[in-house]
Image: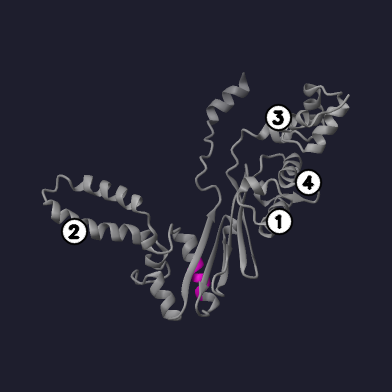
Amino acid sequence: MGISAQDVKSLREQTGAGMMDCKKALQETEGNVDAAIDFLKKEGLAKAVKKGGRIAAEGLIFSKVSGNEAILLELNCETDFVGKNEDFLKLGALLADTVLANKPASAEEALTLSLDGKTVQDVINANIAVIGEKLSLRRFDIITAKDGGNITLYSHSGGRIAVLVEISGADVADDVAKDIAMHIAAMAPNYLDQSEVPQDVLDKEKAFQMEQLKDSGKPQEILEKIMIGKLSKFAGEMSLLQQVFVKDSGGKQKVGAYLKEANKDAKLTQFSRFAVGEGIEKKKEDFAAEVSKMAQ
């Protein structure tokens, strides 16, 4: 019997297996979808669907600088053990190379890229079948150097955190660029300069601070003056150039001042920082419930 493209698409959505594998399964089972699913499971090609509901919050940040371009890419798995697996490491490096070369607009688009005659999603699914855990390409960031700047890469804790930072305008010593990248890894700034902090973020903080001071008895005009200082400090703590440099023993020198001290013509142009699993709610294991379940 003929196998329609819609049948193949439907089976792929149910199993996560590759298009050609789904077509073959339907041909082998004469179009019987349930039998095709069983066929794929026996072949180890439908493991992805079994693991689709699991939380993959471990993994690594794969990073690369190539000329005036660089990438950070987060590939997740379920356990830190798999994060050290050779197949996982090869897959992550391959995905970083592929995404950097093709520059898709999103992680979803990246999954549709062609890789060795298959889609990136198919390649990931094949690795799920081999490795035995849910794997997911969560996100990536590609930066391109501006005005002839130099991009420095810093990877911390074996790839659990990775940073890209561009310094332009003048050359600085490698250790200065690395120190700033290490600072970004440690202090996780949200913005380059405090002028970039969105007004709605400042308004929310102001409302919070005003609520804290509402019973202080101070006049409104005094509270407004107090807010100027509090909001400036709040914005500065989130912004790279205004953060206190983490390696300054005196605890006063700002990152911007540290860079100017190294070279007055140097300028921090942009940065990117990824940490594995940030923003993902990890599953909390209930050991007692697990033991009880096993005893039933």
Graded by Cα atoms within 10 Å as few (under 14), some (14 to 19) or many (20 or more), the crowding at tag 3 reads few
Residue that carries the numbered disc 1 in the rendered image: 98
Graded by Cα atoms within 10 Å as few (under 14), some (14 to 19) or many (20 or more), the crowding at tag 2 reads few
- Residue at 66 percent across and 39 percent down: it is 134
Closer to us: 139 or 173 = 139
Q: Quadrant of residue 154?
A: bottom right
At numbered mark 4, what does the secondary structure look like: helix, strand or loop? strand
Q: Position of residue 136 (x, y in %)?
A: 64, 44
Graded by Cα atoms within 10 Å as few (under 14), some (14 to 19) or many (20 or more), the crowding at tag 4 reads some
Q: Earlier in the sequence, mark 3 or mark 2?
A: 3
Residue that carries the numbered disc 4 in the rendered image: 118
Q: Is residue 108 magenta?
A: no
Q: Is residue 22 above or below residue 243?
A: above
Q: Position of residue 251 (x, y in %)?
A: 35, 69
Residue that carries the numbered disc 3 in the rendered image: 14
Q: Earlier in the sequence, mark 1 or mark 2?
A: 1
At numbered mark 3, what does the secondary structure look like: helix, strand or loop? helix
Q: Is residue 65 left or right of residue 278?
A: right
The Cα atoms of the two marked residues, 2 and 4, are separated by 61 Å
Q: Quadrant of residue 289?
A: top right
Residue that carries the numbered disc 2 in the rendered image: 225
The Cα atoms of the two marked residues, 1 and 3, are separated by 27 Å
**Which amino acid, by three-letter code, is at mark 3?**
Gln
CB of mark 2 within 8 Å of CB of mark 4? no
The Cα atoms of the two marked residues, 4 and 1, are separated by 12 Å
Q: Position of residue 64 (x, y in %)?
A: 64, 63
Q: Main secondary structure of the magenta part?
A: helix
Part of the protein shown in magenta: 176-181
**Which amino acid, by three-letter code, is at mark 2?**
Lys
**Which amino acid, by three-letter code, is at mark 1?**
Thr
